[in-house]
Amino acid sequence: MITLAEWLKDYQKLSEEIEYLEFKIDREKRELKRWVSGDLFGVRLTEGSIAVGLEERIDAMEWDLAHKMNDQISIERFVRVFDGLDNKILYHRYV
């Protein structure tokens, strides 16, 4: 039987992954902005350039982020069904 503590570990791991993905997306969007309208505007791209495929990478990360956020919401819903004072304390502390 899976305990609330195990679910909370999964929840925390998922939260960290979401935070990191949000950071990576923000960083990639800033880089894209440099190529579209910033200091790198007009620079020719080569096949090995960092900007090649930048929009596709952003889209893939946003898709992954959306699924992780859905998983996080599912865990939150599931964890709420645990009874007992200890479980309620854990839920409010970590969720």
Image (tube, rainbow, N blue to C red):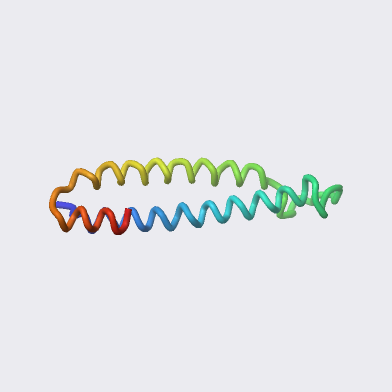
Left or right of 8, for residue 20: right
Q: Nearer the viewer, residue 38 or 47?
A: 38
Q: Furthest residue to the right?
A: 42
State whether residue 22 is above or below residue 81: below
**x, y (%) of residue 30?**
68, 52
State whether residue 88 is above or below residue 81: below
Left or right of 28, for residue 14: left
**x, y (%) of residue 74?**
32, 41
Q: Residue at x 18, y 52 (%)?
A: 2
**x, y (%) of residue 64?**
48, 44
**x, y (%) of residue 80?**
23, 45
State whether residue 94 is above or below residue 64: below
Q: Residue at x 15, y 55 (%)?
A: 85
Left or right of 24, for residue 46: right
Q: Residue at x 28, y 41 (%)?
A: 77
Which of the 4 image quarters holds residue 9?
bottom left
Q: Residue at x 39, y 53 (%)?
A: 14
